[in-house]
Image (cartoon, rainbow, N blue to C red):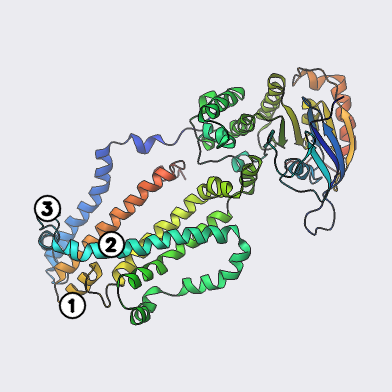
Amino acid sequence: MSDPLLQVEDVTHRYGDAARDVVEDVSFSVAEGQVVTIVGPSGCGKSTMLRIVAGLLKPTSGSVEFEGDRIERTPDGLAMVFQDYSRSLFPWLRVRQNVEAPLWGKTSKQERNDRATQALADVGLAEHADEYAWELSGGMQQRVAIARALASHPQLLLMDEPFASVDAQTRAELEDLVLDLHRRIGVTVLLVTHDIDEAIYLADRVVVLSHAPGRVEETVDVGLARPRDQLETKASPRFVAMRSELLRRLVRPGPEESGG
Amino acid sequence: MTAVAPATATAASESWWGRAAVWMLPILVMVVVWHFITTGLDSIFFPTPAAIWEVLRDDYFSGSASRLFLGDVVFDDLVPSLWRFALGWGFAVVSGILWGLLFGLRPGWRAWVEPLLEFGRAIPPPLVLGIVFVTFGAGDLPKAALIAFGAVWPVLFNTIDGVMSVSEVRIASGRTFGWGRRERIVRIIVPDAGSSIFAGVRVSLGIGLILMVLTEFVGATNGLGYTIIRAQRGFDFAAMWAALVVLAVVGLMLNSLLVLIEARLLGWRATSARGLDV
């Protein structure tokens, strides 16, 4: 097998002079074309892990390599979708300009325009290009954020609990959107979530982090057939078995918490 | 998937005439009320609108066509006033925003200057007016400096607040686009802090106008404030009121200009005309 697109090795991080590590000795890899999800309980450092991969945070030790190069800052070919879309989008720009923003100064105007049109069509927002993002519903705003990430034609799409702030039905829609984009565009996805169902449903591989400090508890190959279906896939014996297995490992202390 | 109803329609759909009427009617009502009160009162301190208009006509609108029909007082007093105001207020806005950006982005530096800023803000400019004039003379520059000194604070503090309340996630988004520090400031922080900065600019406009008049009460040989104080001392109350009316109109025009600029720059908010459905 060829080198993975992303290689995380022995990453440990500790904030400032905090008493203990947020994540400890985390290693995993993401091969091109895969969907990998990181799942773990609240406070296990999974968002920190993703910020390190994005080059937003320097790990205390360990290394992250993207296409064989060590990440110092966000490399070209890497785009990120944040959980909090309303704080991540630019409310003073219209939807189209939001999507074009990552391309400012990097491509011709025509190219920007074409890419934004395509990205908005990909997420089903072609008709909302001239509205302000804040005029849209939460689910649609997160679609704008996804379109913005796609506009830069990333090889690796990072998603930090992208659907934690929307209602259950919208969440299912957006999950299927990600699967659909993965199938059509072939973008590699690394997604962080606290929701075990979501983690299994989307992924080729699930990286399970333990309670804080986050360590890789295990890495599970999902092996469920694609395309997947919210009802059928989630009712399949393999999905159910995997789900109870992961639940047993993760949710011992109490009920599942939301937020990140 | 439902979109929230666009909120931009209401204000724009009203006709130009409708908006002009909304604007003019309260002023007209005030003039009429003023007329009846002053006619009944018959006091030299409160002249009728007609008497005030006479002064306005003779002093402010008596010029020839080549002078745009504007009278001597406009050129001799209003223009010098506005020049000093523009100088002082312009400096206040520009420096307030620049220093505000700096201190907003560098909370460490801000901590060091904070006591000085609070000290400066606490000094009422009218109280140092005498000292400044004795030391530096009462020319255009010392007057403009006093205007700037009074008007800079709301701009400065609002800019600092605006910058510090920019969401961390938004800046992180900019980083993931590969934007450097300068791009993040210009493309994220300035527009994001824009409404806060503008609120400060509007407050500073009022302060600047007050100080424009006030600095002309002492040691001035021209200006709107000088006109007011001279008329008052000469018991020419119609002239005093006329100057006040001109001052009000100038304030109204400058504020309207700011509102226009704000609507252009911050139109995306589009909430001002809507009101809240509480």
Q: Amino acid at mark 3?
A: Ser
Q: Which residue is mark 3?
A: B66
| Letter of the chain that mark 1 sits on in the rendering | B
Image x and y of residue B168, in percent: 64, 49
| Letter of the chain that mark 3 sits on in the rendering | B
Local crowd at mark 1 within 10 Å, few (<14), some, or many (≥20)?
few
Q: Amino acid at mark 2?
A: Leu
Q: CA distance from mark 2 to mark 3?
A: 21 Å
Image x and y of residue A64, in percent: 80, 41
Local crowd at mark 3 within 10 Å, few (<14), some, or many (≥20)?
few
Secondary structure, mark 3, is helix
Q: Is residue B170 left or right of residue B234?
A: right
Local crowd at mark 2 within 10 Å, few (<14), some, or many (≥20)?
some
Q: Is residue A144 left or right of residue A37?
A: left
Q: Please tell me in which quadrant of the rendered image residue B72 appears.
A: bottom left
Q: Which residue is mark 1?
A: B233
